[in-house]
């Protein structure tokens, strides 16, 4: 038995609050000013601004703000606070231009069928992140030892009902999964349930510099990057900055590594 989908259906992730905060903040600015502000954030080099130049991931954060302003929607806020790269950064990573390709966020009209911004964000995750990431891993792990995972929260009646509830039933500024916890507290003591959320993160940043350094560097060679269609100059620059101890987001390098390995395994030409 597994409780997957509880976070996506009932609002258990902190990223929803972050995305809504961005959306609400930029919504205060008049719509006509958004394109100008977007251009400003896209043009300014924050590393030249005193007090900002050493801030963590500051250039990428400026680009993400520009994209949110340009789109002026909670879906855009969700997209750019959740995604590791902006479209501009993806263009820099690849030899071919990728930013003009449409994604789920751009094409799914169902996301516009509600004015409840949080519910729109939940819908994004239980139609993308949940089946394409969470459930994929659970299925592989269980089937590798001949087990079938049972997912009660994935009962379509629960999802359909929960999707029609106002998001205020699910989360607010102080709580997540409100209605779910209210029900559970009838049967399980609060002291047992109300504990900090714990994910399953691993210390990628430390591993790539230590135990996995040789493995990491093997895939970030110029010939492998070229074969995968990546801009080797840009990727090697990020690799070297990371290995020198510069404050680089190691998860970005993890995603690049996964892409290189996938390309090598599945896109080899006979």
Image (tube, rainbow, N blue to C red):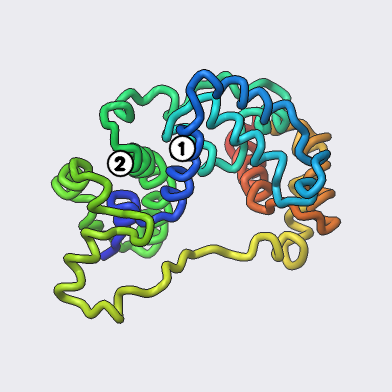
Residue 118 placed where, x, y %?
A: 34, 42
User: Which residue is label 1 attached to?
Assistant: 23
How far from the left and from the top, in percent, is residue 235? 77, 39
- Residue at 37 percent of width and 61 percent of height: 174
Q: Is residue 90 placed above or below 185 in the rendered structure?
A: above
Q: Quadrant of residue 181?
A: bottom left
Q: Quadrant of the C terminus?
A: top right
Judging depth in this view, the residue of 214 and 198 nearest the camera is: 198
Look at the numbered disc 2 and give the secondary structure of its residue: helix
| Rendered image: mark on residue 38 | none
Query: Which disc is residue 119 wearing?
Result: 2
Residue 35, how many percent across, how many down?
58, 20
Between marks 2 and 1 in the image, the one whose residue lies nearer the viewer? 1
Residue in the foreground of this view, choosing between 52 and 208: 52
Q: Quadrant of residue 261?
A: top right
**Snapshot quadrant of residue 88:** top right
**Image position of 78 (left or right of 86):** left
In space, the residues marked 2 and 1 are separated at their CA atoms by 14 Å
From the viewer's side, name the closer residue of 117 and 90. 117
Whether pointer 2 and pointer 1 mark residues with C-beta atoms closer than 8 Å, the reply is no
């Amino acid at each position: 038995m597994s409780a997957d989908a509880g976070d996506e259906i009932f609002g258990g992730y902190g990223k929803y609050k972050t995305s809504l905060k961005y959306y609400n903040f930029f919504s205060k600015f008049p719509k006509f000013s958004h394109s100008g502000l977007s251009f400003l954030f896209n043009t300014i080099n924050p590393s030249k601004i005193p007090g900002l130049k050493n801030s963590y991931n500051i250039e990428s954060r400026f680009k993400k703000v520009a994209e949110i302003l340009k789109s002026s929607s909670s879906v855009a806020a969700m997209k750019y606070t959740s995604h590791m790269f902006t479209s501009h950064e993806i263009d820099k990573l690849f030899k071919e231009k990728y930013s003009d390709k449409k994604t789920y966020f751009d094409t799914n009209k169902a996301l516009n069928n509600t004015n409840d911004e949080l519910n729109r964000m939940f819908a994004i995750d239980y139609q993308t992140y949940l089946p394409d990431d969470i459930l994929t891993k659970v299925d592989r792990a269980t089937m590798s030892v001949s087990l079938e995972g049972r997912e009660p929260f994935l009962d379509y009646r629960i999802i359909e009902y929960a999707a029609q509830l106002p998001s205020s039933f699910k989360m607010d500024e102080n709580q997540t999964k409100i209605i779910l916890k209210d029900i559970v507290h009838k049967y399980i003591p609060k002291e047992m349930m109300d504990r900090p959320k714990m994910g399953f993160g691993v210390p990628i940043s430390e591993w790539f510099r230590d135990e996995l350094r040789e493995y990491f560097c093997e895939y970030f060679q110029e010939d492998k990057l070229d074969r995968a269609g990546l801009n080797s100059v840009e990727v090697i620059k990020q690799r070297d900055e990371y290995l020198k101890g510069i404050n680089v987001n190691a998860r970005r390098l993890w995603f690049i590594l996964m892409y290189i390995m996938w390309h090598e395994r599945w896109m080899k030409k006979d």
